[in-house]
Amino acid sequence: MLVHPQFDPIAISLGPLAVHWYGLTYLAAFGLFLWLASLKVRQPQFAAAGWNKRDVDDLLFFGVLGVVLGGRLGYVLFYKPDYYMHNLGEVLAVWKGGMAFHGGLLGVLVAMALFAKLRGRKFFEVTDLIAPCVPTGLAAGRVGNFINGELWGRAADPSLPWAMIFPQAGDGGVPRHPSQVYQFLGEGLLLFVVLWIYARKPRATGQVSGLFLIGYGLMRFLAEFFREPDDFLGLRAFNLSQGQWLSLPMIAAGVLIWLWASRRKAN
């Protein structure tokens, strides 16, 4: 069996200044978004609509606010509402950890709606632009999870070649699925390839956004079967995790949006 390498979470230390690997993965995510979105706005369907590099910079600014605020509030409301109800002073203490993707997604959607209104653009035009540029950032985040040895997987068959022991789990050396790697490959690389190829051709407004919701929701739902549920939540109804229950509405919304966009295109 493999053993988690136990990386030092601090990548660079200069006197009192400590730069964590997790922070660097966030920087990588933002850098990848800038690069990919800059490529997208040069594609004919977006260039003809007047998109430019300045729009990409502004999208990143709005997106970062949405990710940080939405991700934190989503964690507070979806995962530990009782705790934070009695510890209101810690709601904004992001340095203590605790971010939720589904909350971050809602935050980004609100931020993109505000951007669309300020720029006089259609909401789904904006989300269709950013959707293919998001999965690489998700992949970067999973790299950070793996380096930190957090969000490990469920117990695995010891004969599985890549079964891994995570000392942080404090379970006496139970071999586990490296679920961070599964999510890196699924909701990160695979989803990116599918969306990027799909969005290369002009699509009906909303189709790319719908496919993103379907793809991420499906990849996350499947990955949760291998990821250890949060110890303070466990499994919910029908033995599904909180992440799976939050992913189901995403898949349903994605299907509805894609069908709606397809019908508009047909009409």
Image: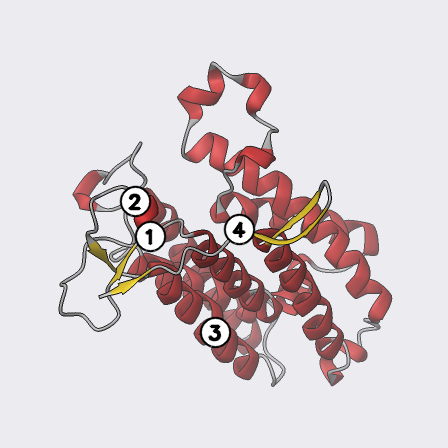
List x then y, in percent, for residue 176: 24, 57
Q: Which residue is mark 2?
A: 169
Disc 3 residue type (three-letter): Leu
* Nearer to me, 27 or 200: 27
Q: Are marks 3 and 2 in contact (CB under 8 Å)?
A: no
Q: Within the image, what quadrant is residue 190 found in?
A: bottom left
The answer to whether residue 110 shows anywhere in this view is no
Q: Which residue is mark 1?
A: 152
Q: Which residue is mark 3?
A: 189
List x then y, in percent, for residue 74: 51, 37
Disc 3/disc 4 C-alpha distance (Å): 24 Å
Disc 3/disc 2 C-alpha distance (Å): 27 Å
Circle 1 Cα neighbour tier, 10 Å, few/some/many (<14 / 14–19 / ≥20): many
Q: Earlier in the sequence, mark 3 or mark 2?
A: 2
Direction from residue 155 to residue 2 in the image, left or right: right
Disc 2 residue type (three-letter): Ala
Disc 1 residue type (three-letter): Trp
